[in-house]
Amino acid sequence: MFVYNIAKSQAAFKSGTFIIMDIAERRNDMIYSKEVENMCTVKCGASHGCAPIPEEGKWVYSREIKDISGLTHGIGWCAPQQGACKLTLNVKEGIIEEALIETLGCSGMTHSAAMASEAIVGKTLLEAVNTDLVCDAINTAMRELFLQIIYGRTQSAFSENGLPVGAGLEDLGKGTRSQVGTVYSTKVKGPRYLELAEGYILRMGLDANDEIIGYEYVNMGVFMDAVKKGVNPEEALNNAKKTYGRFADAVKYIDPRHE
């Protein structure tokens, strides 16, 4: 195990040079106050050790970062709380083997997510939590997941052998797209469904009282997969369209983006 010691010498400290030293050497260099040096030694009798935590179907005494394993989700937010990040990590023996980063509310945050996807995978959990991921929301999510994982509060805590690398993609579904709910509403004009779990909302169906009873949507993942396979875009769009609720019984249909 290695640590960075910037106080090894005054010159090194002033120049900003980092000297790598073994942990045992650091302990030999430990500085004690005069009061502590003058104290007599009293042995510590009780040594209960750490409590075990549940990890991938086992109870583990976690003493080093390599003792940590698990898959978990968590969220983070930026300082002005104008954007958020949902982070999924799959950690095996202290190493982040898989990461799913989903961001919302800030265009700059999406670029930070692109960088973070390269910055944290392959690092230890401790390295990752001390890595600047640029976006405050992603950094906060990383901190929250760190706390969850080291305390054994993961989704795979009681799953034998944990979850395989690739399990993070299951949250995205067949279309490999984040599930985002976007709804707009005003007091004077009421709600407009723009995007829900099923996909991009094309039309809303209203009954005789102008209340929403269903909607028509297009599954963008299914649509794009078909287009990439060479299907005519118009045909692919029609095949990806579906309805929810009592859409067929509506007496009026509106485009939520333009009506």
Image (tube, rainbow, N blue to C red):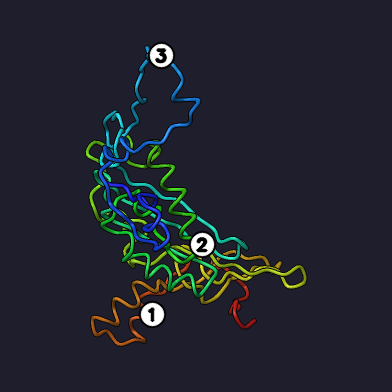
Q: Nearer the viewer, mark 1 or mark 2?
A: 2
Across and down, in percent, residue 6 comes to: 38, 53
**Total of numbered circles in the picture?**
3
Marks 3,2: beta carbons within 8 A: no
Q: Nearer the viewer, mark 3 or mark 2?
A: 3
In the rendered structure, find residue 42 and report the number of the disc placed on it. Answer: 3
Foreground residue among 167 and 68: 68
Q: State how far apart marks 1 and 2 are (Cα).
A: 41 Å
238 relative to 122, above or below: below
240 relative to 18, above or below: below
Q: Nearer the viewer, mark 1 or mark 3?
A: 3
The residue where tag 2 is placed is 136
Choose the circle earlier in sequence order: 3 or 2: 3
Q: Amino acid at mark 3?
A: Val
Q: Quadrant of the N terminus?
A: top left
Q: Quadrant of the C terminus?
A: bottom right
Across and down, in percent, residue 190 comes to: 70, 69
Q: Tell me if mark 3 has few (under 14), some (14-19) or many (20+) residues whose alpha carbon lies within 10 angstroms of its own.
A: few
Q: Amino acid at mark 1?
A: Asn
The residue where tag 1 is placed is 238
Q: Is residue 213 left or right of residue 113?
A: right
Marks 1,3: beta carbons within 8 A: no
Instruction: Find the residue positioned furthest to the right.
Output: 188
| Location of residue 219 (image quadrant) | bottom left
Q: What secondary structure is found at the residue carrying circle 3?
A: loop
Across and down, in percent, residue 68 comes to: 30, 40
